[in-house]
Amino acid sequence: MTERLQTLSGLAPTPKLPAYDRSRLKSGILHLGPGAFFRAHFAPFTDGALAAAGGDWGIEVASLRTPDVADNLSAQNGLYTTLIRDTSGTTAEVIGSILKAHVAPRDPAGLLARLEDPAIRIVSMTVTEKAYGFDPATGGLDLKHPDIVADLANRHAPRGVIGYLVEGLARRRQKGIAPFTPLSCDNLPSNGAVLKRLVLEFTSRIDADLHRWIEANVPFPSTMVDRITPASTEATYADAERLTGRTDMAAIETEPFTQWVIEDHFAAGRPAWEKVRGALMVEDVSAYEKMKLRMLNGAHSLLAYLGYIGGYEFIRDVMDDTALAALAYRHMHAAARTLDPVPGIDLDNYANELIARFANKAIAHRTYQIAMDGTQKLPQRLLEPACEALANGDRAETYAIAVAAWMRYAIGEHGNGERYELRDPRAAEIAALIAGVPRTGLALSAALFTLPGLFPAALTGNRAWTQDVSDKLEILIQDDRLPLF
């Protein structure tokens, strides 16, 4: 059996290696949620910043749930391989910025100790939208979320991301230690502002003095992150071993494109991320974020729902269907019409770039993976811009197609009767809503439009648009082999 990746010595000559002295690196960042996207995005950007400008910005990671990734990183002394795939081939980079991995359920006290260590100046996170414990209907704290319920009841022994952040900040305040900067890198609109609201709503219920201290002293910068990152497969691990000469069970694969727009508001410094290609430090991230959510993520969701119900496994396969590729392009331009100008970005060029990225044959991004958690993704990707499009006199037809495709996917059954799991935090509610409902576009859309807190009144109250959704859903129910729209 091939030796495990544990050091930088003796590797095959193929991969790019860290361009700094890893033995001298000290921790400055604690990252919650060391999933594939973090390893394809945040850690490589930090690796580049360390190579360009140095500094004590090594990363410690912590898993708040499953231990697999943290255990694999621990077994490899934090080292792992990023595979960059495009049609010209695959290259490898070994990332060295991770110094230690924690598993919170095994040692919650250890994680809290790291949160209160003054050496930790940034606490970043990629925990997925559903882990924050926010109510999508209000944008505030979801008082029924299991982690929020548990952490409000027992604030000093947290289990969720908000609970850990609050307890860590509380301990630092109590000991006179400067706060860390919480840095959300999840695909949430205004993710920093959302995180700040959740933290402040949480503290308002437990400690008024802590609430005021956080409000006055803790910045919550928003970020916009973009890099397509499929789930790792046996092919990922095989290619990592081929290119490095070592077994790497933390390896990930991604595309050449990478972008990170960051609001430059930090309490105690940051790595020199602006020295890395693709990173941009700005005063306000909102224009870039809205562009990405509406043009990239919205089109991605459209293709994922249509692709999955049509029997396509990967987005690259969907893009081989010229009609669907043209529909994605049409939707991107419809989304662009809802945007204000974005500094430094030509939206037509951006759309062309997205089409090329989606069609990249070297990236195997599963439609089923992208389709998950739709109730948390639809509002910012599709429903909000649909409202604006209708208000501007646009028919919002591509949005109707996307919503109809989500509704068809939400049935949880292929045309041949084969069932599949609807991977969504509100799957039980959806199933209850459509149980016993006739399998017609009109009946199913009417039921799903009543899902609490999801569809705004500007959409459900627009009879022409809801009829369009109903008609398109009926077509998809009758023929989920993707009739042309």
Image (cartoon, helix red, strand yellow):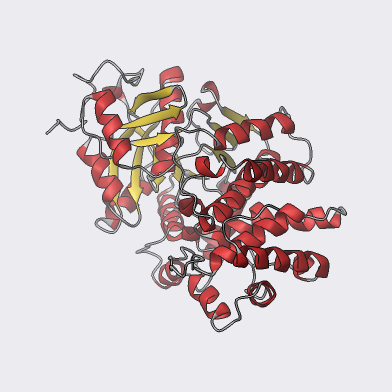
| Camera-nearest residue between 18 and 256 | 256
How far across and how far down the image is residue 267, in percent? 53, 39
| Camera-nearest residue between 45 and 31 | 45
Please indicate whether residue 100 sits to the left or right of residue 156 in the image.
left
Pick out the residue farthest to the right.
393
Please indicate whether residue 219 sits to the left or right of residue 443 in the image.
left
Pick out the residue farthest to the bottom.
436
What is the total number of numbered labels drawn onto the structure image?
A: 0
Q: Is residue 378 visible to the viewer in this orientation of the structure?
A: yes
Pick out the residue farthest to the left.
1
How far across and how far down the image is residue 263, in percent? 61, 37
Q: Is residue 289 visible to the viewer in this orientation of the structure?
A: no
Q: Quadrant for residue 236, please give it.
A: top left
| Residue 228 in the image: above or below residue 132 | above
Q: Quadrant for residue 117, please give it.
A: top left
Q: Quadrant for residue 399, please give it.
A: bottom right
- The residue lying at 41 percent from left, 19 percent from top is 51
| Residue 450 in the image: above or below residue 120 | below
How far across and how far down the image is residue 329, in percent? 69, 40
For the N terminus, which image quadrant? top left
Pick out the residue farthest to the top.
13
- The residue lying at 31 percent from left, 37 percent from top is 235
| Camera-nearest residue between 90 and 124 | 90
How far across and how far down the image is residue 42, in percent? 45, 36
Please indicate whether residue 153 sits to the left or right of residue 463 in the image.
left
- The residue lying at 60 percent from left, 29 percent from top is 280
